[in-house]
Each structure stands twice: as structure tokens, then as C-alpha cells.
């Protein structure tokens, strides 16, 4: 069994708890001294850094949400001078919805190390060719796995997403052995490789797939079609990106890099911390961040944590595959989409707020349609005018969301009204 940082990945419980406690105390002090909005939140609860003496006091700290971060966009939660930052990454979404995460060089190094742990856990070494087809740019997927691959010393192919033909060409010509991308893109690539009759020329042995929900059935299908082992990886922009947790050879959940991210499961309604093994909302406290340290950040992902012994020898706590969300965020083709963003575009363009988002998974790719009711005036117009309206709406939605839905204008009053909460999303994807 190989490990990237064995002393952390296989630390005894006592060693890990002592380290986490010490790091938490320092992190709280750092945040309190440098992040005014969180200092205000602590003061509201009558807390000072001295009240947090270790993990046993964590429960006293206030929670943070995406809205807190948005309210203070962009610099409110930055904890070091900008001159010490070397990079930003950001969530998908609009200006108003975006979260910008900042990194010092130290933060990048730790993030890369977390991703390196994942690559080594799937059998990666400096002999490997790591093919990174997550998006590069503001999205954390490409940069995260790219950095991890460098740390391991593997040959890194910074492919980014899209251009399937080129992906397959590099894969065959350069002998890619580890593929990193979203599970839906992996399934799509597998099909394209078969269609091109190139499966025997592929040297892939493993894949590191995350950024969206995927089922065990999908894992088995990808493994069979690509002739690889498929592993999960989890993370979110706010905590740095991929590599908060990663799967090992046992493939029964993801080990949390708990020396950097302390996990809790809470009841999303009462906010009470739940015991190990309970299902609830996953919350992370960063322990080592300099630029963007978040304490008790509510991920909105529904999850379970367990500390069962793992055959890989790692002692890091494991999280199950996320089982859903406690908010209305949708992940479509790997991009985070809130129905409220679509509503904003519609209202800005004079449409009524009667719309339906229809999602499905066709040939392993998310199909995404937005049906919008026309106003009575539009309805009486000619077909060509309606097509023009659809094209305009598509352009605005693409600008807002970063991905393109199929836009269909439908007759006034044709979308079913609901007696209770409006049904805005029909998600037919079987995940
Ligand atoms: O998706 C970071 C990432 C990149 C993770 C590459 C793994 C691989 P965000 O765009 O901020 O960051 O989206 C974060 O995606 O709260 C989950 O709801 C979802 N998510 C991430 N990984 C998984 C996974 C990246 N393995 C949000 N399974 C998170 C299910 C996942 N959902």
C-alpha cells in the first residue's frame, strides 16, 4: 500500500485529535483577528478566541453559509493582505451568486498535497500519465488535480474539458494511465472510445471522478466500459476545491483529509451536531488555511461520516457519497445552477415567473431544458419572432449560468400551477 503523506493518512486517533485541536485554536485566532464579519458573529455569541481551547469547544462557534460569503463579496472573508495571495478560484454562477476563494502559495501547496493523496490512493506514481479533463480556469477541478499530479511527479496532461476527439488522441498517443474528469464525461468518453474502435489502444488503469453525484451503477458501467477502476473525489470551491476527501482501493466512501478539514454532521433544521453514523448536513472547518479560512461552513450536502477500520490502512474518517442537498442547488454538467438565477433572467426580460426546468440524463450527459411561458402579447406573434425571442433568452441564460439550456417558449398558462410550493424542477436523472 502506498501513501502520499503516511504520517497524516495513518495517524492514530490520539495524534490526529491533538493535531486538530492545536490547529483549530490557531485557526480561530487567525480568523477572529483578520475576518471582521466572522469576528462580529463570534462577538454576537459572546465568544473570544480564548473560549476555543480545542475540538471540544468547536460546537460553540457560529456556522457560515454561502449567503454569508456572498453578502461580503468579494473580500469580506479574506484573512490575509491581498499582496500575500497568489490565486483565486470561483464557483460557477453570476456576479451576485459567485463565491471567490483566495489562496496564498501555502494554501495552494496544501491543496495540491490533498489531491496528491488521492492520486497515490488510486495507485498513481511518477511513472503515470495523468490526463486531467476537468475544466481549467475559475473551476477548481482542473487546477486541483493538476497540482496534485505535479506533487506526485506524474506526467500531467492539462487537457481541460471538451474536444473529445483530441482527448482520445492524446490518450492513445501519450498513453494516459489515470483519467480525472466528471463521471458523466468519463461515461461519455468511454462511449466515444468504443465508437472510434480504440478501446484496445487505451492504457488507462484508473479514474478519479467527482464534482457531481454518481451512483454505484454508473461506477460499474464506467469500470466495465473503460476497463479501469473508478474512484470518487469530493470537494467544494469554498474549502479549496477537490481533495477534501478521496476514495482508496476499498471503494467504500471517501477518506476526509481531516488534518486540514474537520468534518461534522448536523441536523439542518435544529443545527444540532449528530453522532457518527447519522445522516445529516456536512459541515467543514478548515484547520490550516491562510487566505480563506472558513469555520463551520455548511456545505448543504447530505452525508454520513463513519470511522470504521479501512483495509487500505488509512485512519482518516470516511464520508459516504453525498446523498442530496439541503438547498435547491442543481448540478448540471458539473456546473452549479440555482433556479433563482433563471428566474432573475426571466423577470429581467419581461417574462412571467412561470417556468419549468427539465433535467434528464441522455447517453450519460445531462440534458437541460427550460420551458418558459410567453406573455399573451408574445403568443400572438409570428413563429420567426418567437424563435428570435428564444435565441435571446438562451444567450442571457448562457451568460448567467455558464452553460446552455434548450429554451422552449410555451403558450401562456400552459405550465401546470401548483396549489402548494411551485414545482420548478423536474429531475428525471437517475443518480
Ligand atoms: O465541484 C470541486 C470538485 C472538482 C470536486 C473536481 C471533485 C472533483 P464546486 O463547483 O464548488 O466544487 O461544487 C461543490 O459539488 O458541494 C457537492 O454538492 C458537489 N460534489 C463535489 N464532489 C462531489 C462528489 C467542485 N464526489 C459541490 N459526489 C459540492 C457528489 C459532489 N457531489
Image (spheres, rainbow, N blue to C red):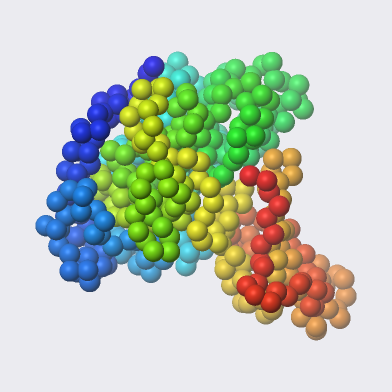
Q: Quadrant of the C terminus?
A: top right
Which residue is at 14% across, 51% downward?
A: 53
Residue found at the far bottom of this picture: 377
Front one among 326 and 350? 326
Between residues 87 and 307, which one lies in front from this camera angle? 307
- Dividing the picture into quadrants, the one containing residue 120 is top left
Q: Position of residue 83 (x, y in %)?
A: 25, 53
Q: Horizontally, is 114 left or right of 169 in the view? A: left
Q: Residue at x 51, y 41 (%)?
A: 321
Q: x, y percentage for residue 259?
A: 28, 38
Q: Is residue 401 visible?
A: yes
Q: How far across and how far down the image is residue 260, in percent?
A: 29, 41
Residue sitting at 42 percent across and 47 percent down?
A: 278
- 326 lies above or below 157: below
The answer to whether residue 96 is left or right of residue 430 is left
Residue 391 appearing in the image:
no
Rendered position, 236 above or below 130:
below
Amino acid at each position: 500500500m502506498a501513501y502520499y503523506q503516511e504520517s497524516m493518512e495513518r495517524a492514530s486517533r490520539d495524534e490526529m485529535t491533538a493535531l486538530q485541536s492545536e490547529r483549530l485554536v490557531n485557526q480561530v485566532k487567525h480568523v477572529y483577528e483578520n475576518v471582521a464579519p466572522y469576528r462580529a458573529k463570534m462577538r454576537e455569541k459572546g465568544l473570544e478566541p480564548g473560549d476555543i481551547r480545542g475540538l471540544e469547544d468547536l460546537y460553540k462557534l457560529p456556522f457560515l453559509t454561502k449567503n454569508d460569503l456572498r453578502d461580503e463579496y468579494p473580500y469580506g472573508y479574506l484573512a490575509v493582505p491581498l499582496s500575500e495571495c497568489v490565486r483565486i478560484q470561483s464557483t460557477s454562477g453570476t456576479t451576485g451568486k459567485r463565491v471567490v476563494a483566495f489562496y496564498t502559495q501555502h494554501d495552494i501547496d496544501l491543496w495540491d498535497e490533498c489531491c496528491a493523496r488521492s492520486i497515490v490512493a488510486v495507485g498513481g506514481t511518477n511513472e503515470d500519465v495523468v490526463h486531467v479533463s476537468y475544466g481549467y480556469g475559475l473551476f477548481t477541478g482542473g487546477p486541483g488535480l493538476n497540482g496534485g499530479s505535479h506533487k506526485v511527479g506524474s506526467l500531467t496532461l492539462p487537457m481541460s474539458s471538451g474536444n473529445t476527439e483530441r482527448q482520445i488522441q492524446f490518450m492513445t498517443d501519450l498513453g494516459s494511465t489515470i483519467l480525472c474528469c466528471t463521471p458523466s464525461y468519463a461515461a461519455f468518453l468511454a462511449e466515444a472510445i468504443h465508437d472510434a474502435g480504440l478501446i484496445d489502444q487505451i492504457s488507462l488503469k484508473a479514474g478519479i471522478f467527482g464534482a457531481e453525484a454518481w451512483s454505484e451503477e454508473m461506477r460499474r458501467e464506467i469500470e466495465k466500459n473503460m476497463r479501469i477502476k473508478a474512484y470518487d473525489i469530493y470537494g467544494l470551491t469554498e474549502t479549496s476545491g477537490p481533495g477534501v476527501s478521496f476514495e482508496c482501493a476499498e471503494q467504500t466512501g471517501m477518506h476526509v483529509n481531516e488534518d486540514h478539514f474537520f468534518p461534522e454532521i448536523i441536523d439542518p433544521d435544529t443545527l444540532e451536531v449528530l453522532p457518527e453514523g447519522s445522516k445529516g448536513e456536512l459541515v467543514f472547518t478548515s484547520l490550516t488555511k491562510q487566505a480563506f479560512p472558513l469555520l463551520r461552513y455548511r456545505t448543504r450536502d447530505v452525508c454520513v461520516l463513519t470511522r470504521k477500520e479501512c483495509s487500505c490502512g488509512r485512519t482518516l474518517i470516511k464520508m459516504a457519497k453525498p446523498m442530496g442537498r439541503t438547498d435547491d442547488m442543481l448540478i448540471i454538467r458539473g456546473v452549479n445552477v440555482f433556479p433563482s438565477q433563471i428566474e432573475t433572467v426571466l423577470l429581467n426580460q419581461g417574462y412571467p415567473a412561470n417556468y419549468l426546468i427539465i433535467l434528464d440524463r441522455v447517453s450519460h450527459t445531462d440534458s437541460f431544458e427550460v420551458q418558459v411561458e410567453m406573455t399573451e402579447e408574445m403568443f400572438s406573434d409570428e413563429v420567426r419572432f418567437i424563435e428570435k425571442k428564444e435565441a435571446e433568452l438562451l444567450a442571457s441564460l448562457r451568460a448567467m449560468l455558464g452553460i446552455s439550456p434548450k429554451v422552449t417558449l410555451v403558450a401562456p398558462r400552459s405550465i401546470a400551477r401548483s396549489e402548494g410550493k411551485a414545482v420548478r424542477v423536474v429531475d428525471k436523472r437517475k443518480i
